[in-house]
Image (tube, rainbow, N blue to C red):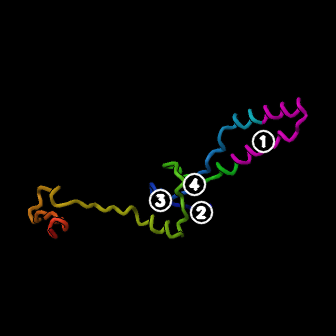
Amino acid sequence: MKDRICTHCYHVGQPTTQGMGSFAVDALMWMIFFSLSMFSSIFPLMLIPLAWTTYHIFIYNKSTCPECGRLNMVSLDSRKGKRALKGPNVVVSYSAAEDPDRRDHQPRQEPRDRRASDR
């Protein structure tokens, strides 16, 4: 399997497969519906645990990041992967009034209300 990168924590490596869910719940479903179908002779009841197990297999067959556990693993060759390889883009913006050490700023002027000036 090819290496992937997590777009959340920027971990590069092999993704882990998410677990199959609770095996005990699936086994309990199979036992209950098997016994019900055998005692009542309603064999189509066995479709319910079959659908339940199939649903779990499809839902829990996802690749997750081994570091953060999220589903954000993408290929290194993809557009998102190339962007993630550059690292996080951190943009810090603040107004000059928040930084008391900056003296080269001019105070903000409040915009005038047009409706008040049109009267």
Find residue 93 and report its image quarter.
bottom left
Find residue 20 and report its image quarter.
top right
Looking at the rendering, the stretch of residues picked out in magenta corresponds to 30-56
Q: Look at the picture and state if 80 lies above or below 50.
A: below
The disc labelled 2 sits on which kind of residue? Answer: Lys
* Residue with the mark numbered 1: 48
Q: Is residue 66 left or right of residue 58?
A: left
Name the residue rendered at 52%, 56% in the picture. 72
Residue 29: image location, x then y, percent: 75, 35
In the image, residue 47 lies in the stretch drawn in magenta: yes
State the separation of the CA atoms marked 4 and 2: 9 Å
For this rendering, which residue is in front, 36 or 91?
36
Pointer 2 local density, CA inside 10 Å: few below 14, some 14–19, many at least 20: few
* Residue with the mark numbered 2: 2
Give whichever of discs 4 and 1 has the lower sequence position.
Answer: 4
Residue 102: image location, x then y, percent: 12, 61
* Residue with the mark numbered 4: 15
Labelled pair 4, 2 in contact (Cβ < 8 Å): no
Residue 12: image location, x then y, percent: 50, 59
State the separation of the CA atoms marked 4 and 3: 12 Å
Q: Look at the picture and state if 82 lies above or below 35.
A: below
Image quadrant where one finds the C terminus: bottom left
Q: Secondary structure at mark 3?
A: loop
State the separation of the CA atoms marked 3 and 1: 38 Å
State the separation of the CA atoms marked 2 and 3: 16 Å
